[in-house]
Amino acid sequence: MEVRKSSVRTKKIKSARKKDLVVARNLLLVVTTDFLCWFPIGVMGIMALNGHVISGDIYAWTAVFILPINSALNPVLYTLTAILGNTKFNPNTEEQNRTEITEELGNYFKDCRLVNKMISVRRIQKSDFKSVTSVLEQDYSLATHDLVRLSVTLFKLLDVIHKGSLVFENLNKDSVHIKVKGEKITGDIKVLGEPRESRKSEDIPNDTLQAAVIIHSLMSQLNVSK
């Protein structure tokens, strides 16, 4: 699978490089023709500034012949390069939208897999995870960075399930469990309970408020200066 992915990635790079070369070639052709048309005019300007007398006929031929050629060549060049390159100008906004939606869904499912590890429908059996209530009753050491990590993890969990219009039935100090290593608390958490569909507009704000209350209880009752 890795070899296959690598070959696909290489093909994409080669295809993009080929398209860049085609664009560069077409641009060079247009710039060259523009330069050839405007170069005589630039030379005439420099000569006039140095005191050379240029007849009116030359100005007339320049305005009637050279400048219209420059304007007329550009659409011809663009058309010819498109025909020779067998390219079609067909911007597809639907394809771009599908790509953006696919990326968004991919990121969401990735977050869901991570969140799934933090939710337990059944009773949490692991001895290294303790409920917030149990943690508050005992003298555990909580460092500031661990408290920040715990807060980010909990609110990240809520953010993912809220995007899916889900909420926890009862988020409280007994349902939120924190991993304890020795006498120290880490930032890993597990939530006991199955998320349900949000039926009221206040469900998601209430979920967020309950999480804030849990974090506040840890801040106020534990020694975060350790």
Image (cartoon, helix red, strand yellow):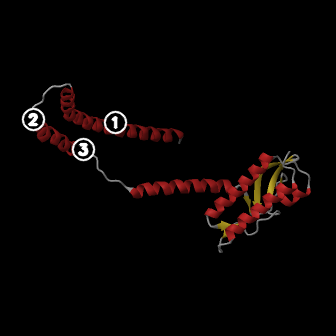
Q: Which mark is residue 56?
A: 2
Question: 36 left or right of 10?
Answer: left
Q: What's the amino acid at mark 3?
A: Tyr
Instruction: Please name the residue that numbered disc 1 is placed on.
Output: 21
Q: CA distance from mark 1 to mark 3?
A: 15 Å
Instruction: Please name the residue that numbered disc 3 is placed on.
Output: 78
Question: 16 left or right of 127?
Answer: left
Q: Nearer the viewer, residue 73 or 126?
A: 73
Q: Position of residue 21 (x, y in %)?
A: 34, 36
Q: Position of residue 158 (x, y in %)?
A: 68, 60
Mark 1 or 2, nearer chain start: 1
Q: CA distance from mark 3 to mark 2?
A: 34 Å
Q: Position of residue 68 (x, y in %)?
A: 16, 42
Mark 1 or 3, nearer chain start: 1
Residue at the (66%, 74%) spot, across then down: 200
Helix, strand or loop for disc 2: helix
